[in-house]
Amino acid sequence: MNKIVNVIKLMAQTGLFFANVDGQYDSKEKEFIENFVASIEQVGDLEPELKADVTDSLNHTYELPAIIEATKDLVDGFSDEERAAILGSIQSFIERVIAIDGEVHPAEEESFKQWKAALGVA
């Protein structure tokens, strides 16, 4: 169960990074990420501290190197199939975040390119 929470938390942090990398945190981006984090309520019986920890991740700013490191740490120890599935989900989430405001900023594109290269995602 904690692995699921860790994935949700990392995705929220990654989404926040990409939503802010262009210097403008659009209301559509904010709503999308907040709705995603709210989905943690759907993950069975979680301790209130874990839910609060994920929700609290919305109150911070993140840098790309830290996001990449956290992603590498998260997928470490998973099988190749599981790793690919997790990275694919995060990649899809990033794509939705950067496109949701109707404009893909060059800073978003460049950061996404770096993220994919660092994690070996095509």
Image (cartoon, helix red, strand yellow):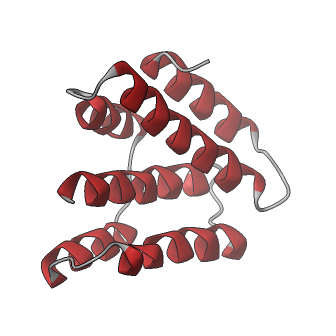
- Image-quadrant location for residue 35: bottom right
> Is the residue 24 above or below the residue 72 in the image?
below
The picture places residue 80, in percent across and down from the top left corner, at: 37, 20
Q: Quadrant of residue 82 in the image?
A: top left
Q: How many marks?
A: 0
Is residue 116 placed above or below 55 in the rendered structure?
above
Q: Position of residue 55 (x, y in %)?
A: 33, 76
Name the residue located 30 percent from the left edge and 56 percent from the top edge.
4
> Who's the residue at 52% across and 17% down the image?
117
Q: Position of residue 27 (x, y in %)?
A: 68, 76
The answer to which of 63 and 53 lies nearer the viewer is: 53
Task: Residue at 38%, 58% (x, y): give it.
Answer: 8
Indicate the quadrant where residue 44 lies: bottom left
Please state if 53 lies on the left or on the right of 84 as rendered. left
Q: Nearer the viewer, residue 86 or 95?
A: 86
| Location of the N terminus (image quadrant) | bottom left
| Residue at 60% over, 32% down | 112
- Dividing the image into 4 quarters, which one contains the C terminus? top right
On the image, the x and y values in percent for residue 113 come to: 61, 24
